[in-house]
């Protein structure tokens, strides 16, 4: 193990001892916010320090076995113990490298998932509806909550645009690589001659900001318009100016929300989406700047990037970023996304490790 890595692990080991002391001190834990913060740090350190203790024990076992090499009767046993111990050290060091990778501070946040129909007309809007169902089913399997924030329905029952809020532990961690262009190849329901059409949608995954702390918006930069909601909702929703349109003048970002009868509630929801979009824009600008130095798995974050193709006639889904093809499209469209999402996370982790090695 490199000296720098061991020094870092020794530091974390000492910090865990300190945290144990602080958490057992009733005076230090009277502040509940501080207590929760210490508990979170403690929970994050335990797996790292436990794995480091296993590494130190394996190293000590090798030292003990080496002392037995001079004993003729024990030499064979000692050599076998040393070989096994050295392999265990390699495995444990690889595990520790992964545990020491920098955590994405947004991983545990809730998200806004935005799906927009692209090329393909009505078929694209229907595919947007299919994608929404796919993500909603996955969220259901994870016991997450899905809340529709805004929707613009098409004539055939699809969506020109839909925004949902997904609330649940690790939502961003699991879905953060879904942003980009999603292409579908299939025979549309409206196709009378059985020809395969290609359509596309764009997906944007944005973290929900902590109130307005993450993005500072000058009230002078914000314009709010109210209007009568259209579509379903009964007589009341169409009789009052309950729908809200927010425009952030410096960026030109526009958000509409009309799904609630309350103008106040619609404004609150629209503001949350607006903040998320501004934060997402800032993050993508940072990624584009960093991409010139090192290309990451999620590239520049350009929504036009084609990341995945759903080919229904062949029953396959292909993710073009990691060259992975899975032949279980029906299961995946029903929310079975774990194999794909895990492969994306693993590839990202491998790139992080490679970058760590180059540093």
Image (tube, grey):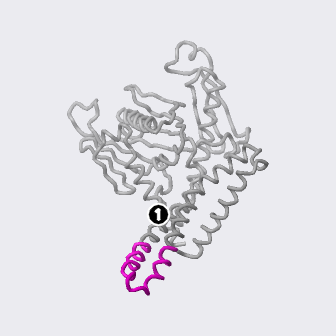
Q: Is residue 221 left or right of residue 143?
A: right
Would you name the residue on which mark 1 appears? 351
- Find residue 221 and report its horizontal and vertical position in percent: 70, 40
Q: How many marks?
A: 1
In this rendering, would 236 be left or right of 216?
left
Task: Residue at 53%, 39% (x, y): give it.
Answer: 168
Question: Compared with residue 277, is residue 9 higher up or lower down, i.e. above or below?
Answer: below
Q: Is residue 93 magenta?
A: no
Q: Is residue 238 above or below residue 269?
A: above
Measured as percent of width and height from the top left, residue 207 is found at 57, 44
Q: Which residues are magenta?
A: 60-86
Comparing 121 with 66, the one in front is 66
- In this view, the residue farthest toward the left is 193
Which residue is nearer to you in this view: 334 or 115? 334
Which image quarter holds the C terminus?
A: bottom right
Extreme residue in the front direction: 73
Q: Residue at x 49, y 60 (%)?
A: 296
Q: Main secondary structure of the magenta part?
A: helix
Direction from residue 127 to residue 6 in the image, left or right: right
Q: Is residue 247 above or below residue 155?
A: below
Q: Is residue 130 left or right of residue 67?
A: left
In percent of width and height, residue 248 lies at: 65, 40
Residue 200 or 27: which is nearer the viewer?
A: 27
Residue 186, percent from left and from top: 28, 39
């Amino acid at each position: 193990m490199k000296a720098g890595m061991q020094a870092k692990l020794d530091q974390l080991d000492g910090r865990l001892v300190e945290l144990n002391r602080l958490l057992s001190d009733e005076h230090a834990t009277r502040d509940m916010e501080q207590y929760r913060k210490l508990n979170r740090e403690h929970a994050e350190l335990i797996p790292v320090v436990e794995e480091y203790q296993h590494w130190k024990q394996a190293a000590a076992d090798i030292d003990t076995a080496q002392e037995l090499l001079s004993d003729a009767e024990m030499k064979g046993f000692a050599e076998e113990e040393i070989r096994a111990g050295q392999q265990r050290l390699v495995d444990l060091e690889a595990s520790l490298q992964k545990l020491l990778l920098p955590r994405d501070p947004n991983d545990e946040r809730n998200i806004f998932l935005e799906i927009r129909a692209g090329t393909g007309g009505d078929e694209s809007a229907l595919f947007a509806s299919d994608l929404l169902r796919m993500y909603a089913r996955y969220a259901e399997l994870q016991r997450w909550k899905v809340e529709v924030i805004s929707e613009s329905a098409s004539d055939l029952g699809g969506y020109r645009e839909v925004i949902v809020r997904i609330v649940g532990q690790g939502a961003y961690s699991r879905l953060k690589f879904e942003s980009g262009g999603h292409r579908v190849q299939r025979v549309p329901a409206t196709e009378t001659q059985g020809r395969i059409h290609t359509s596309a949608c764009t997906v944007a995954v944005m973290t929900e900001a902590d109130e307005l702390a993450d993005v500072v918006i000058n009230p002078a930069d914000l314009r709010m318009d109210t209007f009568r909601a259209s579509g379903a909702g009964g007589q009341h929703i169409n009789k009052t100016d309950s729908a809200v349109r927010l425009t952030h003048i410096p960026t030109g970002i526009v958000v509409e929300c009309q799904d609630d009868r309350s103008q106040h509630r619609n404004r609150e929801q629209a503001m949350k989406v607006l903040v998320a979009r501004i934060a997402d824009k800032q993050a993508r600008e940072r990624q584009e700047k960093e991409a010139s130095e090192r290309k990451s798995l999620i590239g520049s974050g350009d929504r036009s990037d084609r990341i995945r193709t759903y080919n229904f006639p062949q029953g396959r889904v292909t993710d073009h970023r990691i060259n992975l093809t899975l032949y279980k499209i029906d299961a995946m469209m029903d929310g079975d996304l774990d194999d794909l999402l895990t492969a994306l996370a693993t590839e990202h982790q491998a790139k992080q490790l490679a970058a760590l090695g180059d540093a």
